[in-house]
Image (spheres, helix red, strand yellow):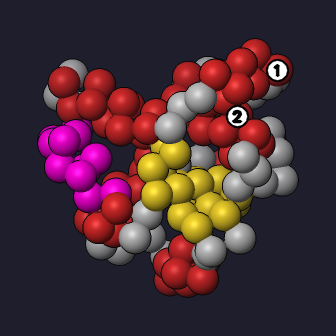
Amino acid sequence: MRLLLDTHVFLWVVAGSRSLKVAARRTIESADEVLVSAASIWEIAIKARLGKIDVDPDLLAAAIAPSGLRELPVRAVHAAAVAKLPMHHADPFDRLLVAQAMSEPARLLTADAMLGQYTELVELV
Protein backbone atom coordinates (compact mmCIF):
# COMPACT_ATOMS: atom_id res chain seq x y z
CA MET A 1 0.00 0.00 0.00
CA ARG A 2 1.20 3.50 -0.88
CA LEU A 3 0.44 6.35 1.51
CA LEU A 4 0.64 10.10 1.06
CA LEU A 5 0.85 12.07 4.29
CA ASP A 6 -0.91 15.40 4.49
CA THR A 7 1.10 18.27 5.95
CA HIS A 8 -0.17 17.93 9.53
CA VAL A 9 0.41 14.20 9.56
CA PHE A 10 3.93 14.67 8.19
CA LEU A 11 4.69 17.20 10.94
CA TRP A 12 3.30 14.80 13.57
CA VAL A 13 5.41 11.93 12.23
CA VAL A 14 8.64 13.94 12.22
CA ALA A 15 7.94 15.40 15.68
CA GLY A 16 6.84 12.06 17.15
CA SER A 17 3.65 13.82 18.23
CA ARG A 18 0.99 12.12 20.31
CA SER A 19 -1.57 13.74 18.00
CA LEU A 20 -0.85 10.83 15.67
CA LYS A 21 -2.95 7.96 16.98
CA VAL A 22 -1.60 4.43 17.39
CA ALA A 23 -3.74 3.11 14.53
CA ALA A 24 -2.33 5.74 12.17
CA ARG A 25 1.22 4.90 13.24
CA ARG A 26 0.54 1.23 12.50
CA THR A 27 -0.86 2.11 9.09
CA ILE A 28 2.25 4.13 8.29
CA GLU A 29 4.61 1.42 9.57
CA SER A 30 2.88 -1.28 7.53
CA ALA A 31 2.82 0.68 4.26
CA ASP A 32 5.01 -0.35 1.35
CA GLU A 33 5.80 3.28 0.60
CA VAL A 34 5.09 6.51 2.51
CA LEU A 35 5.18 9.72 0.50
CA VAL A 36 5.54 13.37 1.49
CA SER A 37 4.58 15.88 -1.15
CA ALA A 38 6.86 18.75 -2.09
CA ALA A 39 3.63 20.77 -1.75
CA SER A 40 3.68 20.09 2.00
CA ILE A 41 7.17 21.56 2.31
CA TRP A 42 5.99 24.55 0.26
CA GLU A 43 2.99 24.99 2.57
CA ILE A 44 5.23 24.73 5.64
CA ALA A 45 7.66 27.29 4.18
CA ILE A 46 4.85 29.79 3.55
CA LYS A 47 3.31 29.31 7.00
CA ALA A 48 6.73 29.59 8.67
CA ARG A 49 7.47 32.82 6.79
CA LEU A 50 4.09 34.24 7.85
CA GLY A 51 4.80 33.31 11.48
CA LYS A 52 1.90 30.83 11.66
CA ILE A 53 4.19 27.95 12.63
CA ASP A 54 7.63 27.87 14.18
CA VAL A 55 9.56 25.32 12.13
CA ASP A 56 12.53 25.30 9.78
CA PRO A 57 11.38 24.17 6.32
CA ASP A 58 14.95 23.23 5.35
CA LEU A 59 15.26 20.88 8.32
CA LEU A 60 11.89 19.31 7.55
CA ALA A 61 12.79 18.78 3.91
CA ALA A 62 16.06 17.20 5.00
CA ALA A 63 14.16 14.94 7.46
CA ILE A 64 12.08 13.21 4.77
CA ALA A 65 14.49 10.45 3.73
CA PRO A 66 16.01 9.80 7.20
CA SER A 67 12.45 9.36 8.50
CA GLY A 68 11.93 6.50 6.04
CA LEU A 69 9.68 8.62 3.83
CA ARG A 70 9.95 9.39 0.11
CA GLU A 71 9.50 12.80 -1.45
CA LEU A 72 6.73 13.10 -4.03
CA PRO A 73 7.44 15.94 -6.47
CA VAL A 74 4.62 18.06 -7.80
CA ARG A 75 4.27 17.12 -11.45
CA ALA A 76 2.26 18.79 -14.18
CA VAL A 77 -0.29 15.95 -14.17
CA HIS A 78 -0.92 16.61 -10.46
CA ALA A 79 -1.41 20.32 -11.00
CA ALA A 80 -3.76 19.75 -13.94
CA ALA A 81 -5.84 17.25 -11.93
CA VAL A 82 -6.76 20.01 -9.44
CA ALA A 83 -9.00 21.56 -12.12
CA LYS A 84 -11.16 18.43 -12.17
CA LEU A 85 -11.87 18.48 -8.43
CA PRO A 86 -15.16 19.86 -7.13
CA MET A 87 -14.83 22.83 -4.78
CA HIS A 88 -15.41 20.89 -1.55
CA HIS A 89 -12.36 22.56 -0.04
CA ALA A 90 -10.77 25.94 -0.77
CA ASP A 91 -7.24 25.27 0.53
CA PRO A 92 -4.98 24.99 -2.55
CA PHE A 93 -2.43 22.78 -0.78
CA ASP A 94 -5.05 20.28 0.35
CA ARG A 95 -6.60 20.23 -3.12
CA LEU A 96 -3.18 19.50 -4.62
CA LEU A 97 -2.60 16.68 -2.13
CA VAL A 98 -5.96 15.14 -3.08
CA ALA A 99 -5.07 15.43 -6.77
CA GLN A 100 -1.72 13.78 -6.12
CA ALA A 101 -3.32 10.94 -4.17
CA MET A 102 -5.79 10.31 -6.98
CA SER A 103 -3.12 10.55 -9.71
CA GLU A 104 -0.52 8.30 -8.11
CA PRO A 105 -2.70 6.50 -6.66
CA ALA A 106 -1.99 6.57 -2.94
CA ARG A 107 -4.10 6.71 0.22
CA LEU A 108 -4.04 10.22 1.69
CA LEU A 109 -3.71 10.19 5.47
CA THR A 110 -5.24 13.36 6.91
CA ALA A 111 -6.94 14.82 9.95
CA ASP A 112 -9.16 16.98 7.72
CA ALA A 113 -12.57 15.30 7.42
CA MET A 114 -13.59 17.67 4.60
CA LEU A 115 -11.11 15.94 2.27
CA GLY A 116 -13.06 12.70 2.53
CA GLN A 117 -15.66 14.22 0.21
CA TYR A 118 -13.26 13.86 -2.72
CA THR A 119 -12.37 10.20 -2.86
CA GLU A 120 -12.32 6.92 -0.99
CA LEU A 121 -8.52 7.24 -1.05
CA VAL A 122 -8.75 9.72 1.84
CA GLU A 123 -8.21 8.08 5.22
CA LEU A 124 -8.87 10.04 8.40
CA VAL A 125 -6.42 9.73 11.28
Q: Is residue 95 left or right of residue 73?
A: right
Q: Position of residue 18 (x, y in %)?
A: 35, 74
Q: Secondary structure at mark 2?
A: helix
Q: Quadrant of the N terminus?
A: bottom right
Mark 2 Cα-neighbour bin, 10 Å: few <14, some 14–19, many ≥20: many
What's drawn in magenta, residue-wise? 53-64
Q: Is residue 61 above or below residue 82?
A: below
Q: Is residue 59 magenta?
A: yes
Who's the residue at 70% across and 34% down the image?
99
Task: Name the residue carrying label 1.
Answer: 84
Hey, what amino acid is under mark 1?
Lys
Disc 2 marks a residue whose amino acid type is Ala
Q: Any mark on residue 99, and which?
A: 2
Q: Please tell me in which quadrant of the rendered image residue 67 appears.
A: bottom left
Counting residues from the start of the chain, the first of labels 2 and 1 encountered is 1
Number of numbered discs: 2
Residue that appears at 38% across and 31% down: 43
Residue 10: say if magenta.
Answer: no
Q: Is residue 9 left or right of residue 42?
A: right
Residue 35 position, x and y percent, is: 53, 56
